[in-house]
Amino acid sequence: MATTSTPAGARGGARPPARERLLDAAGELFYRDGIRAVGIDAVIERAGVAKMSLYKHFRSKDDLVVAYLQRREQRWREHFQSRMRAAGTTPRERVLAVFDVLANWTESENPRGCAFINAYVELADAGHPGNAVARADKEWLRAYLTELVAETRAPDPETLSAQLFLLLEGALVTTAMGTVDGAMSSARAAAERLLPD
């Protein structure tokens, strides 16, 4: 969808480099409207760059999609890790803090649901490089959660972390779809019951 609003990243003073403006535009449009629905021309127009600039930085739309997902993953991971550094004093509290941090991110950054789940659904080709980025993000969070759960001295941390991960992912989807009110709070409450005291 074409837009006539100010190009992404355009502010007073010097404009960001073309690559950053393209990533800003792609991040906004791909997340809001969907990767498949947004054409290269819409990204170029939103970024306020020439088509040649896009192909100077990205060989194809697929490359732009990968860069968009990598950038979003970096932002999410930085947000997550900074919040987790200040989270809880006991292993149990730190596990529950994962739900709180994800709830905060979802409220501020994920009105249309998880960008990685959305991308995985849209990119039907299992071999699409964007799917590798989406899967890597989920695998990283699952591994992080498993380490936290192991610190609680749960008898079977692998199984418990898988259950907690399913609660997190389910809450993300139901929050986006609006099918369960307070989905992340409900998921957190279920996690409290599963975790050892």
Image (tube, helix red, strand yellow):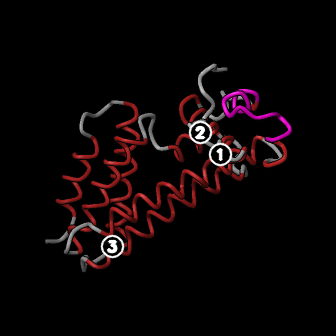
Where the N terminus falls, by quadrant? top right
Which x, y percent locates residue 150?
32, 78
Q: Nearer the viewer, residue 29 or 90?
A: 29
Image: magenta residue range? 41-53
The residue positioned 21% from the left and 67% from the top of the image is 93
Question: Disc 2 or disc 3, which is closer to the eye?
Answer: 2
**Figure quadrant of residue 12:** top right
Q: Quadrant of residue 34?
A: top right
Q: Earlier in the sequence, mark 2 or mark 3?
A: 2
Q: Which residue is mark 2?
A: 9
Specify few, some or many for label 3: CA neighbours under 10 Å numbering under 14, 14-19, or 20 or more: many
**Three-letter amino acid code at the position of disc 3:** Leu
Q: Which residue is mark 1?
A: 16
Q: Residue at x 54, y 40 (%)?
A: 118
Q: Secondary structure at mark 1?
A: loop
Q: Main secondary structure of the magenta part?
A: helix
Q: Position of residue 50 (x, y in %)?
A: 81, 33
Rendered view: 44 above or below 173: above
* Mark 3 secondary-structure assignment: helix
Q: Give amino acid for label 1.
A: Pro
Q: Within the image, what quadrant is residue 191 found in?
A: bottom left
According to the picture, the residue beneath numbered tag 3 turns out to be 148
Residue 53 versus residue 12: which sits nearer the camera?
Answer: 12
Residues at discs 3 and 1 in contact (Cβ within 8 Å): no
Q: Please state which amino acid type lies under the numbered disc 2.
A: Gly
